[in-house]
Amino acid sequence: MKNINIAIDGPAGAGKSTIAKMVSAKLGYIYVDTGALYRACALYITENNIPDEDIEKSLPNARLSIKFADGVQRVFLGDRDVSGLIRTPEISMAASRTSAIPAVRAYLFETQKKIARENNVIMDGRDIGTVVLPNADVKIFLTASAEERAKRRYKELAEKPDCPTYENILEDIKKRDYQDMHRETAPLKQAEDAVLVDTTKLTLEQSAEKIIEMIGEKL
């Protein structure tokens, strides 16, 4: 029997990861956070000061791997769990840039496809429904206003001592949106057969329930 693949795309801060985790837990699917994979590559490139021309030959040395525990993805570089290190604003911006590099996308493309072939998955990212899983059973484009996304990110980071201001977060989100939508390789866009879900006025729980209903109707 063919495995079920659910693709969720959308801009930074739309709640894709959190909502996809909630939905996958309720449906018993594996959640694949592709953004975390790109962030891990960005972390490796940043930490090692690798110039663009050396990225293709250097990435295999990163020994990037993912492990699943209770449906939750953990990301490793070698033996080091970097799941927490890849969530800083610096790495977020670096990931937006490095994800546009063809060598990085090629390095991760087969990893993502293999996971989807072997499991029932909910995979989120920027180009899942358009490039990685163009034949996904259900495609969702998840979005929210830039202001709402900045508010959510600020709330998430507020307790950290080096938390940026709301204004800085909003500026970063708008800059990231522009980079993601205008990059030459696999730009962020809604697949023609994807359903648009705007979560600006929805709670995470309401968003997850709405998506679960949509998946049930589609399948």
Image: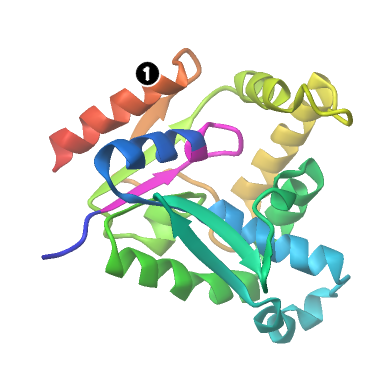
Q: Residue at x 88, y 28 (%)?
A: 161
Please state which amino acid type lies under the numbered disc 1.
Gln
Q: In the rendered view, tell whether residue 151 sits above or below residue 68.
A: above
Q: In the rendered view, tell whether residue 63 sits above or below residue 75.
A: below
Q: Residue at x 64, y 52 (%)?
A: 83
In the depicted view, which residue is nearer to us: 140 or 190?
Answer: 140
Crowdedness near tag 1: few (<14), some (14–19) or many (≥20) residues, C-alpha within 10 Å: few
Q: Is residue 16 left or right of residue 59?
A: left
Confirm whether residue 184 shows in the render: no
Outermost residue on the bottom side: it is: 57
Label 1: which secondary element: helix
Where does residue 110 sit, x and y in percent of width and height?
45, 75
Where does residue 127 sit, x and y in percent of width and height?
47, 54
Q: Residue at x 60, y 33 (%)?
A: 13
Where does residue 70 sit, x and y in percent of width and height?
40, 49
In the depicted view, which residue is nearer to us: 79 or 138?
Answer: 79
Outermost residue on the top side: it is: 201
Q: In the rendered view, tell whether residue 171 sits above or below residue 181.
A: above
Residues rendered magenta in the picture: 5-17
Q: Quadrant of residue 27?
A: top left
Q: Is residue 60 left or right of residue 157?
A: left
Where does residue 125 sit, x and y in percent of width and height?
50, 50
What residue did someone put label 1 on? 206
Please identify the quadrant where the N terminus is shown.
Answer: bottom left
